[in-house]
Amino acid sequence: DDIAFFHGRPEAGVKDMAMSLVLLRDPVFLGEKRIKAAITFAAVDKNSHLQLMRELGGYLQDEEFLSLLRNNGSKAEIMKKLQEGAEMV
């Protein structure tokens, strides 16, 4: 599905809540899975972890956003969609 997810846990040393997005011009492979975008998130506790998952879930239900990730959307287009989503939260 071209998108990979990685997360850090509090017991692994996470000190601040964070989320990042990495877009790859050329895909990489993890086993058989082709990756064009990676979303990482880190949470300091269970509550913040759930908050990040809710936010991320909203973006992952947006087909336009997913299309931008899978089809090398521009930074400006992706940032615009992220800002629109942040305004809805």
Image (cartoon, helix red, strand yellow):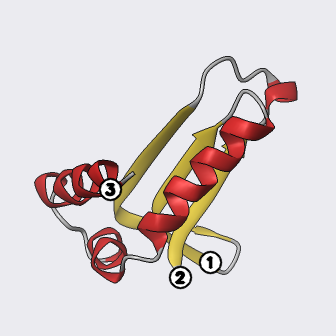
Label 2, label 1: how far apart the Cα atoms are: 8 Å
Q: Across the whole image, how many numbered discs are drawn on residues? A: 3
Which quadrant of the view contains residue 45?
top right
Which residue lies at the image location 80% right of the left edge and 28% below the top edge? Answer: 10
Label 3, label 2: how far apart the Cα atoms are: 26 Å
Kind of residue at badge 1: Lys
The circle on residue 1 is 2
| Disc 2 crowd, CA 10 A, few/some/many (<14, 14-19, 20+) | few
Q: Is residue 19 above or below residue 77?
A: above
Which residue lies at the image location 14% right of the left edge and 60% below the top edge? Answer: 77
Residue lying at the far right of the rendered structure: 11
| Disc 3 crowd, CA 10 A, few/some/many (<14, 14-19, 20+) | few
List the residue tagged with mark 3.
88
Q: Nearer the viewer, residue 75 or 10?
A: 10
Q: Nearer the viewer, mark 1 or mark 3?
A: 3
In the structure shown, which secondary structural element does the residue marked by tag 3 occupy?
helix
